[in-house]
Each structure stands twice: as structure tokens, then as C-alpha cells.
Image (cartoon, helix red, strand yellow):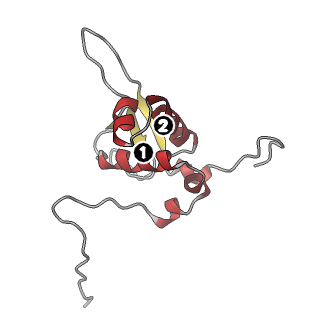
Amino acid sequence: MAKKHNLPFDKVGGTLVLNRRLLTSNAFTELKPTDKVLITLLQLHWRNDKPVSYGVREAAKKIPCSINTAGKSFSKLQEHGFIECVEQSQFSSRLGSRARDWRLTWLPYLDQPPTNEWEQWRITNSVNGIK
């Protein structure tokens, strides 16, 4: 019979875990610090049954950084395959605003396994066009 281990994870507030393969990937190591913080902030809001609704203003406030820098971080995470936009943002003075909805590719979504697009990302040499 296997011995049950009591790991010292926070049972009240929950625990975020990023797998070692993701943390050591080229896609992750090439990110800027603000991009890496955004990954954690997005995962804080993750649920299997719905996309993560998170916008640049909220990210800029939490990181902290400018709205422009937060927007670049979202773009970089998309480019590297960590997130995919599933619903565009909307602004209306009558109806109210809502942030973009994101699927986090390293986590399950709608009971489907992670798609891990970040694993296909390769460093591109822009001068020679070599991957």
C-alpha cells in the first residue's frame, strides 16, 4: 500500500502550479518579466468551464506597468502560443464594457485536454529567417 504524503500546499487559498516543461521551454524563457507575470495573473482566474475574462487595464494595474506594456504582453503570449482569444472585447457606453476572453493553452478547457501550442513555438532569427 502506497504511503500518502501530506504536501505543504495552502488548502485555504489554493495553489497555482506551472509544469516544469513549460517553465523550461524556449517559448517561456524568451518572455519578458511582465509577460511571465501575466501568465500567473491569467491562471489565477482560470476555470475549466469558461474562458478567462481579463483585460489590459486590469493587467496593467496588477503587474504594475503601462496599458501599452500590458497590451504587448498579451500579444507576446498569443504569439508564443500560451493564450488564444475566444471572444473579443467590447466597449459600449450604454451596455457597458467587457474584457477579452482567453483560453489558456497549457490548461484544460471545457473538459478537453490542454492543446499546448507553446510547444510548437520556435525562436526565429529575423535577419536570416531561420527557425
Left or right: 74 with respect to 93? right
Answer few, some or many: residues within 10 Å of disc 2's Cα (few below 14, many 20 plus, some between 14 and 19): many
Left or right: 89 with respect to 3? right
Q: Tag 1 or tag 2, which sits nearer the N-term?
A: 1
Residue at the spot x=47%, y=50% of the render? Answer: 36
Q: Quadrant of the N terminus?
A: bottom left
Left or right: 48 with respect to 107? left
* Position above or below: 16 against 8: above
Which disc, if any, is residue 74? 2
Residue at the spot x=47%, y=38% of the render? Answer: 84
Where residue 113 appears, as percent x and y from the top left, is: 41, 53
Q: Nearer the viewer, residue 93 or 109?
A: 93
- What residue does disc 1 label? 38
Where residue 112 appears, as percent x and y from the top left, is: 38, 49
Element type where label 1 sits in the image: helix
Quarter location, residue 38: top left
* Position above or below: 126 against 9: above
Element type where label 2 sits in the image: helix
Residue at the spot x=57%, y=54% of the render? Answer: 119
Where residue 129 appears, as percent x and y from the top left, is: 80, 42
Q: CA distance from mark 2 to mark 1?
A: 8 Å
Which disc, if any, is residue 86? none
Quarter location, residue 55: top left
* Position above or below: 74 against 14: above
Q: Which amino acid type corresponds to the residue marked 2 in the rendered image?
A: Phe
Callout 2–callout 1 Cβ contact below 8 Å: yes
**Which residue lies most toward the bottom here?**
1
Residue at the spot x=82%, y=41% of the render? Answer: 127
Where residue 108 appears, as percent x and y from the top left, is: 37, 51
Answer few, some or many: residues within 10 Å of disc 1's Cα (few below 14, many 20 plus, some between 14 and 19): many
Q: Which amino acid type corresponds to the residue marked 1 in the rendered image?
A: Leu
